[in-house]
Amino acid sequence: MILRPEGCSISLVDLGRDMQRATNLDALIQGVTHDSQQVQPGDLFVAVPGLDVHGMTFIEQAMSSGAVA
């Protein structure tokens, strides 16, 4: 799956800065998902805009389910 939401871009510098604030950069990523209900321990949760709700709403749920970033 390729995700390219319109109007949503970030530089690698900003992404790295955000990641340093949010999580441990030594964490090993086991998988990637944008569905907080599908998060498994070690996953990277990608919070993207949805039709009704932005994925950022589900960051806490994803982290509780084991997302490392």
Image (tube, helix red, strand yellow):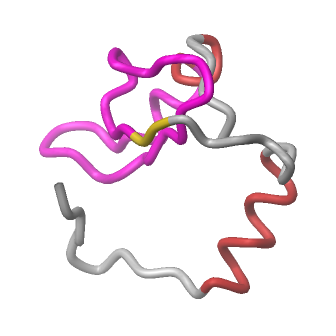
Q: Nearer the viewer, residue 3 or 10?
A: 3
- In the displayed structure, does residue 48 sit left or right of residue 27? left
Q: Nearer the viewer, residue 28 or 23?
A: 28
- 10 in relation to 33, above or below: below
Q: Position of residue 33 (x, y in %)?
A: 36, 38
54 magenta-colored: yes
**Image quadrant where one finds the C terminus:** top right
Q: Position of residue 46 (x, y in %)?
A: 44, 47
- 49 in relation to 27, above or below: below
Q: Position of residue 18 (x, y in %)?
A: 74, 63
Q: Residue at x 21, y 45 (%)?
A: 50
Q: Residue at x 43, y 46 (%)?
A: 47
**Image quadrant where one finds the N terminus:** bottom left
- In the displayed structure, does residue 54 sit left or right of residue 63? left
Q: Position of residue 25 (x, y in %)?
A: 84, 53
- 45 in relation to 40, above or below: below
Q: Quadrant of residue 6?
A: bottom left
Q: Quadrant of residue 63?
A: top right
Badge count: 0
Q: Residue at x 63, y 12 (%)?
A: 64
- In the displayed structure, does residue 57 sit left or right of residue 28? left
Q: Residue at x 80, y 71 (%)?
A: 17
Residues rendered magenta in the picture: 33-60
Q: Nearer the viewer, residue 65 or 50?
A: 65
- 51 in relation to 62, above or below: below
- In the displayed structure, does residue 40 sit left or right of residue 34? right
